[in-house]
Amino acid sequence: MTDENIELNFDPSQKPENEKEKNGETVAETGALVPHPSTIVPTRAETPLHQRMNRSFLDYASYVIRDRAIPNLADGLKPVQRRILWSLHQNDDGKFIKVANIAGHCMQYHPHGNVSIEDALVVLANKRYLIEGQGNYGNIYTGDPPAASRYIECRLTELAREELFNDEITDFVPSYDGRNKEPVTLPARLPLLLMLGTEGIAVGLSSKILPHNFPELLEAQIAILQDKPFKLLPDFLTGGLMDAKEYADGAGSVRVRAKIKVKDETTIVIKEIPPTCTTESLISSIEDATRKGKLKVRSINDFTSEDVEIEIKAPQGVDPAQLVDALYAFTDCEASITSRLVLIKDNRPVEMTVSQVLRENTAKLLADLKRDLELTQHKLREELHFKTLVRIFIENRIYKKIEQCKTNEAVLSAVHEGFKPFRQEMYRDLNDTDVEMLLAVRIRRISLFDINKHREEMDKVKAELDQVGKNLKSLTQYAISRLKALLQKYGPQYPRLTKTSRFDEVEAREVAFKSFKLSYDREKGYVGYKAGGDEYQVNCSEFDKIIMVFKDGLYKVIELPEKLFVGPDLIYCGIAERDRLMTLAYTDRDANYLKRFNFGGTILNKEYHCIPPKSKILFFQPDTPEELYIRYKPAPHQKINQQICKPADLAPKGVQSKGNQISIKEIASINTKPTRGWDPEETTTRLQFT
């Protein structure tokens, strides 16, 4: 990417509803000229329906990009955020206001309902800088939702009140229904786009801007004004650790990690989490990794309230440092976030870098400060002019000349004539507005007029006017002094939360795998990776859980054993997978049954049963065999001695389900293929399940 702005493929030739015709050209409300549709040369013959569909889609795309999803470079805000802040400004009296009331007021400007407004307001409040909340605004760590809007309150922060608004230099446009006026952009003197960060998905493009540290942004702006180098890195509210070697000035990505400390030989504690997750989703990812055998965790306890605290107990024999590496490798404790600064500049979407955005913000800061100073200068000159008029009007008793006047025209003429000898003392010519203000001066003020006090007031105004003039002449130094004042006032309130460091690469295979071969010695009755048997040889990691099933239907889940005595009645041993389907046939005193099921969740070392009491397993196999060959014991008057069935015809059920009945005959054998005793010449029927 070059240092120049990269303009995206966005056709501004289609005008949204908020644009109008002027002199054969389309003029957006923001003042940007857009080519007239008549100048567009169609590339192929199109029917009126095609033209209408294309035009409607482009109108919709333009609206979503400019007026909903993508923030504006000028003030760093999306439309809904700007309208919320403007509503708070209009209702600001220093007291807290119900969020529901602000949402209702904001609906005058925002056409998308109260829910989107309330959600956006909560997000802004949780970012701390602009809105101060009172009540339950949810929890950014746990993901708990906020209370209803009628129960929570908000107001502008002092920072927002001082640095976002100036109604006299704000440009307005009609709201969506034409009944009100809303600001095109706010005259914000803060780099809000990089302060707040944002994420938006529009038609054909998306934006992902990471939040940055407020004091660091101010320091970088000072460096820009002083023509010094600077570097900016993201800073997240949830804290954590960050490797930003691939950030590339906002055009790359960062890797973020939870902050994990080893408490003792069996305990580790997560104190900060990445911004991509909550404590709930993080714990869920740890549990999922544990179920899949990637981790070995004994217990997880979440003590999060105002601060994150997730305590993880490691099983005996597991090194906590190794568990930390495994958490980074297999869970949401580490994530990658890609940054893409797409924003609206001059009514068009463009992609920029962090330094380009901040330089634009700094240039706008200078422009806004200049406009503000010029406005202040004009007000002070007018105030000084009027104070001079009052002094001349009272000291020279010009008001006496209007006592005999009988018409308004005569009064105006008398005052104008009275001031002519004093033109050199005035700052400009007298006009009718000045006369109207002089005529409004009360008699009490005239009678109590104090020339010395009046001169002191004029000297004070002159001093302020001189200072404004000096600030205008050295605008850059004035901006630097303002930024330093902000830095001194607010810097301690917003320390950096995310610590920067370089991460070591964690190889998942090295963390998760230490090969063990589980086996079963039926003759001696031992199972484990040191049992030395020939049955159920399964490759495992030390984090895998093992499930054992016995002839009487008893099963339980255990840690991977070295050498455990279980006896000769084990019929299955393997890695515990809660969602893996099993096929089982069993008999009780009355009939024979077949079922497909999964074991689901279990508690370690607790005994369960997968068939009713006093029953016996006839067949057990993981997954679903293609066919089963069932051989019955001979009996008098028995016509069918063997059958074939397809287990896939059975719907999977729970582990405690009874299953489908096969028959009431006594079964000699069940196998997945014909074996000894199966007679191919004998009548064989296919067993159908109802």
Image (spheres, rainbow, N blue to C red):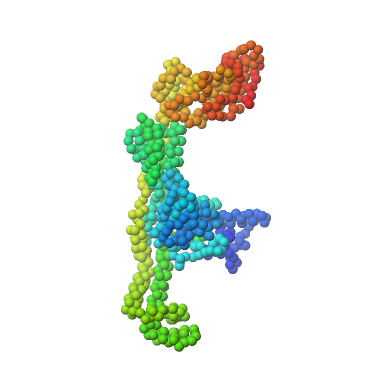
Q: Is residue 153 above or below residue 398?
A: above
Residue 603 in sight = yes
Residue drawn at x 39%, y 23% is: 562
Task: State the image quarter where residue 377 is shown.
Answer: bottom left
Q: Is residue 611 above or below residue 497?
A: above
Q: Nearer the viewer, residue 77 or 516?
A: 77
Most distant residue in the front direction: 444
- State left or right for residue 646 relative to residue 144: right
Residue 56 percent location from the top left of the image: 61, 56
Residue 32 in sight = no
Q: Nearer the viewer, residue 655 or 478?
A: 655
Most distant residue in the right direction: 47
Residue 492 percent location from the top left of the image: 33, 54
Q: Is residue 559 above or below residue 429?
A: above
Most distant residue in the top direction: 636
Residue drawn at x 60%, y 17% is: 665
Q: Nearer the viewer, residue 7 or 388?
A: 388
How many numbered marks appear? 0
Residue 516 percent location from the top left of the image: 42, 26
Residue 221 percent location from the top left of the image: 38, 59
Most distant residue in the bottom direction: 404
- State left or right for residue 314 relative to residue 111: left
Which of the image's four quarters has the C terminus? top right
Q: Is residue 648 above or below residue 402?
A: above
Residue drawn at x 36%, y 29% is: 317
